[in-house]
Image (cartoon, grey):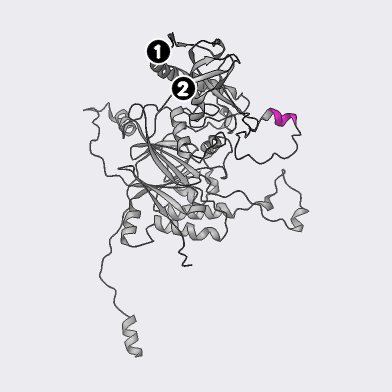
């Protein structure tokens, strides 16, 4: 029996050839819309109010044109509506319309002036889940460079409005000095670029002067799939490893059968949309450490490098096989104000070898980018963020319809309307990068309570795919987007529990 057992184990290698699965290539062309200049060009000495004036100057003509087309011949009881240039030019009892910036006066909303007048040395209270007042003390204002006007009426209750969005309202002022709104208009979706428009335009600039000119490429290769994940929440605990290992094995084509491996090969790029590292946790201090003096007020012995190390190992394992775009989030080691700048590559000693060299114009295989972010993937315009703008809008409204909030941001043409009022942001002076110049084809938001997807349509036939990404640490869910059809599918990772 021993000889027979030996014959079974010692066999010559088979000549069977296994198919080699190649990953689908990724056509990636990011934009630097939210990149802030470093060095002397970056400072916080200027005022924040300029952002609202820049936003109003950019979007007010657009909103006025839409309102003018809709209300030019509108009349009530023989009185024809007329346009008012400034909010303070509104007269009582006169049917008119005016455009301006919304300001929400909410008693529960954080107020920096109130914080200064109080005991500022006391720790700040935790952020409220909602700013809405239960007793109806919230007021909606419309303001411009001349002043403010209080708005009331049914259209405000049927639509989402928050501080910072630009709208036009039609109605009349009552005896109490309040403007009763009869109708409301927003900027709506801007122009949407055609697929491959930017890539073909760049190619035309490069070779347009050559003999024969530029001919657009009519036949494009078949697209693959793009994977989205957010809220990895890596803390370094042993509980993180199982779900992350399942995700990693699936993306590398090491999990499942042959069909699963073939599907994994179609994934051309991975987007990680914020909160990859959990909230910072300090190491417990020992008695000997408490007696040591801190250098520059920083206690290095309390720093816990384990989450960053685990995240770096996770990325470096995937990067030889799949390109990754990393968007920072609220809990990640990046600046807290919007737009968040890329996470420094020094935090990823293993993964940074796949990043682009400094001062390079081409993105690397590992692209640590800004939050928000926009760019072209397989010819489609993508735009997304780590979730902070939607989470802040959520605090202004009573409901929890995240897709409706995402749609409102696009129709307002503003990616972060509540910045800088209740959402920290950089004090821009010459431009407002949050104004949406071109409508995306895909708009994704990370770290949302649940997965949701929908398609909205603009006035000129623009179609935008909305994707709310769940937190992977809580749900174990990853979203796949087909770049040919823009159809989405949900992949869930978990451990089978027979009980």
SS for dot 2: strand
Quadrant assignment, res 455: top left
Q: Position of residue 245 (x, y in %)?
A: 47, 59
SS for dot 1: loop
**Left or right, residue 183 beside residue 398:** left
Residue under numbered circle 2: 184
Classed neighbour count for the residue bearing mark 2: other residues with Cα under 10 Å, few (<14), some (14–19), many (≥20): some
Q: Position of residue 133 (x, y in %)?
A: 62, 33
Residue under numbered circle 1: 72
Q: Position of residue 465 (x, y in %)?
A: 38, 38
Quadrant assignment, res 466: top left
**Left or right, residue 434 beside residue 214:** right
Which of the two labelled residues, at mark 2 and mark 1, occupies the earlier sequence position?
1
Q: What stretch of residues is rendered in magenta?
A: 113-129
What residue appears at the point 72 percent right and 55 percent down from the top-left corner?
Answer: 285
**Left or right, residue 448 beside residue 122:** left
Q: Position of residue 160 (x, y in %)?
A: 50, 30
What residue appears at the point 25 percent right and 32 percent down from the top-left corner?
Answer: 216
Q: Mark 2 and mark 1: span between their CA atoms?
A: 14 Å
Q: Nearer the viewer, residue 170 or 34?
A: 170
Classed neighbour count for the residue bearing mark 1: other residues with Cα under 10 Å, few (<14), some (14–19), many (≥20): few
Up-down: is 225 above or below 252? above
């Amino acid at each position: 029996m021993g000889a027979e057992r030996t014959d079974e184990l010692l066999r010559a290698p088979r000549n069977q050839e296994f198919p080699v699965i190649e990953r689908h290539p990724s056509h990636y062309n990011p934009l630097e819309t939210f990149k802030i200049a470093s060095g002397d060009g970056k400072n916080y000495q200027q005022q924040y109010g300029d952002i609202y004036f820049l936003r109003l100057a950019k979007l007010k003509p657009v909103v006025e044109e839409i309102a003018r087309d809709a209300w030019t011949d509108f009349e009530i009881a023989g009185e024809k509506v007329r346009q008012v240039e400034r909010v303070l030019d509104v007269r009582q009892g006169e049917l008119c319309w005016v455009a301006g910036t919304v300001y929400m006066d909410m008693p529960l909303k954080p107020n920096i002036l109130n914080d200064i007048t109080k005991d500022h040395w006391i720790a700040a209270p935790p952020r409220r889940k909602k700013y809405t007042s239960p007793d109806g003390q919230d007021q909606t204002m419309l303001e411009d460079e001349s002043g403010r006007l209080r708005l009331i009426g049914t259209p405000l209750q049927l639509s989402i409005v928050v501080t910072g969005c630009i709208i036009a309202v039609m109605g009349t002022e009552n005896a109490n000095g309040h403007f009763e709104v009869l109708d409301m208009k927003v900027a709506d979706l801007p122009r949407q670029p055609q697929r491959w428009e930017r890539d073909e335009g760049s190619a035309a600039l490069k070779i347009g002067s050559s003999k024969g000119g530029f001919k657009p490429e009519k036949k494009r290769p078949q697209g693959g799939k793009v994977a989205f994940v957010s809220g990895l929440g890596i803390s370094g605990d042993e509980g993180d490893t199982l779900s992350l290992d399942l995700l990693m094995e699936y993306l590398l084509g090491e999990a499942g059968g042959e069909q699963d491996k073939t599907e994994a090969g179609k994934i051309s790029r991975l987007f990680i949309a914020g909160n990859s590292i959990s909230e910072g946790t300090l190491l417990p201090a020992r008695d000997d450490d408490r007696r040591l003096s801190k250098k520059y007020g920083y206690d290095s012995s309390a720093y816990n490098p384990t989450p960053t190390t685990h995240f770096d190992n996770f990325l470096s394992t995937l990067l030889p096989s799949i390109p990754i775009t990393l968007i920072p989030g609220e809990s990640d080691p990046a600046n807290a104000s919007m737009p968040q700048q890329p996470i420094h590559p020094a935090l990823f000693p293993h993964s940074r070898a796949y990043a682009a060299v400094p001062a390079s114009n081409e993105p690397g295989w590992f692209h640590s980018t800004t939050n928000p972010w926009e760019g072209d993937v397989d010819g489609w315009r993508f735009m997304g963020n780590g979730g902070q703008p939607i989470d802040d809008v959520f605090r202004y409204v009573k409901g929890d319809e995240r897709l409706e909030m995402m749609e409102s941001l696009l129709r307002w043409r503003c990616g972060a309307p509540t910045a800088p009022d209740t959402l920290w942001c950089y004090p821009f002076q010459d431009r407002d990068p949050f104004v949406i110049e071109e409508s995306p084809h895909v708009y994704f938001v990370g770290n949302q309570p649940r997965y949701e997807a929908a398609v909205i349509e603009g006035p000129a036939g623009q179609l935008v795919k909305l994707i709310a990404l769940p937190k992977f640490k809580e749900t174990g869910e990853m979203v796949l987007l087909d770049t040919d059809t823009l159809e989405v599918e949900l992949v869930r990772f978990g451990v089978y529990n027979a009980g």
